Image (cartoon, helix red, strand yellow):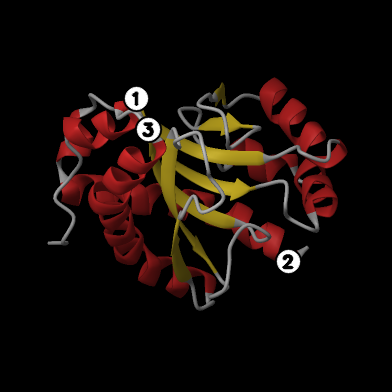
Amino acid sequence: MNGFSGFSEKDFDVFSIEGLENRMEALRFRLSPKLEEIAHELQPAISAETGEEMYVHVAKHARRSKNPPNDTWAAIANNKRGYKKLPHFQIGLWGDNVFLWLAFIYELPDKERIAEAFLEDSDLLKSGIPDHYVLSKDHTKNEALVYNEENLSETLHRFRDVKKGEFLVGRRFSSDDDLLKDGDAFINEAQKTFETLLPLYKKAMNV
């Protein structure tokens, strides 16, 4: 039994609150604690599987001065001070879905070499990832691509060749998915998802 009891409609309603300050307050008091709780539930298993000390980071949205955030997340990475320059695991929400990503975002310094390693080891990405997983090439957009050979190739080439190119792979769950209401079931599904993605994480960390 874990401390996370599931998501509710009110969690997703946070993103329809008008105004930066009001939405940020709701994020801080309603969503950030839940995401932090989930990340802390998942962190020991990821630490054990990777053999690395992993740390939880909750999105602060500190640079925002005008537009309220349309999504929020917690990240798990092997650095206490930050995660954006590292491959990391993400749990988060948009107004209509919950996402679980293994994320390689544009701030990653070795992204060209990591992309090349993935392009060269197509078996790892083709056979190791189920076809109900999804891809994203931009963590700031609420969109996902079907996980297939064409989208994978396009996303990885963009990740390698375009400065702002990103590579995210994982799962998305619609806000009305019953799984989200059951805390234990969601934690179990998240653990399975990140276990599936661990070989990609390890490959990237060895580059």
Q: Measured along the vertical axis of the image, is residue 77 above or below residue 90?
A: below
First in sequence, mark 3 or 2: give its number. 3
Give the residue type at disc 1. Answer: Asp
Can you tell which mark lies on residue 206? 2
Camera-nearest residue between 118 and 127: 118
Position of the N terminus by quadrant:
bottom left
| Element carrying mark 1 | loop
Give the residue type at disc 2. Answer: Asn
Q: Are marks 2 and 1 in contact (CB under 8 Å)?
A: no
Mark toward the viewer: 2 or 1? 1
Circle 2 Cα neighbour tier, 10 Å, few/some/many (<14 / 14–19 / ≥20): few
Camera-nearest residue between 178 and 7: 7
First in sequence, mark 3 or 1: give its number. 3
Residue wearing tag 3: 19
- Figure quadrant of residue 15: top left
How far from the left and from the top, in percent, is residue 94?
39, 32
Residue wearing tag 1: 96
How far from the left and from the top, in percent, is residue 115?
78, 45
Q: Give the residue at x 50% y 39%.
A: 170
Q: Give the residue at x 46% y 55%.
A: 60
Q: Name the residue furthest right.
A: 161
How far from the left and from the top, in percent, is residue 150?
71, 21
C-alpha separation, residue under disc 3 versus residue under disc 2: 43 Å
In the image, 148: left or right of 26? right
Position of the C terminus by quadrant:
bottom right
Q: Measured along the vertical axis of the image, is residue 134 above or below residue 120?
A: above
Give the residue type at disc 3. Answer: Gly
Circle 3 Cα neighbour tier, 10 Å, few/some/many (<14 / 14–19 / ≥20): few
Q: Give the residue at x 84% y 36%.
A: 162
How far from the left and from the top, in percent, is residue 159?
77, 38
